Image (spheres, grey):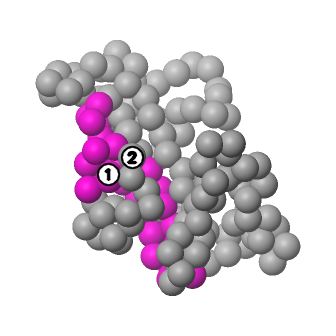
Amino acid sequence: MDTARFAIGHDTAGVAINEGMRTTNRPSAADWLVNTIGDYSKFAAFVLQGAGLSAAVLADMTSPQVQFDDKPNEAMGLGWEVIKGPPDDPIILLHTGSDEGIKTMILVLPTSQRGLVMFTNGERGMEVIGRILHSSLSMKELDQ
């Protein structure tokens, strides 16, 4: 793994904040997915194509499994947040990542076969991601 190629996070003033945090020596299923935006985009396309899953498992992945108490239109599916979307895209699959100075989001819309993969290296990255969602997909449902 070429850690010299890792993105460096920045605080709200643009100062690098995690230069020494290039990697971890301990595996974690919940954190530190090391990937390129190109490969993660290929993964998004694979999910849009059904991810090689049976129809039953794909239905479970894209259906609410655990409802959030305070968000009636959002739930957890299998590995994804499942959000109720507009009539032309009733299911939105979402996964985010957030470390200090690094904010990411993958969003796929199975019905329209669209998606976005966004990586930022700034503490205000979710603000940027929100603007991208509004301008490219008109996604008012995902206000951050």
Report helix, strand or loop for mark 1.
helix
Which residue is more in the foreground, 56 or 71?
71
Magenta residues, start to end: 105-131
Check disc 1 and report the residue beneath it: 129
Q: Is residue 21 above or below residue 80?
A: above
Q: Amino acid at mark 1?
A: Ile
Q: Amino acid at mark 2?
A: Gln
Report helix, strand or loop for mark 2.
loop
Q: Position of residue 53 (x, y in %)?
A: 77, 71
Q: Is residue 47 magenta?
A: no
The crowd level at tag 2 (other Cα within 10 Å; few <14, some 14-19, many 20+) is: few
Q: Position of residue 85 (x, y in %)?
A: 53, 70
Dividing the picture into quadrants, the one containing residue 59 is bottom right
- On the rendered structure, is 115 left or right of 95? left
Dividing the picture into quadrants, the one containing residue 102 is top left
Which residue is more in the foreground, 3 or 136?
136
Check disc 2 and report the residue beneath it: 144
Q: Is residue 126 magenta?
A: yes
Which residue is more in the foreground, 99 or 128?
128
- On the rendered structure, is 10 left or right of 85? left
Q: Is residue 48 above or below residue 79?
A: below
- The single residue placed furthest to the right in the displayed view is 56
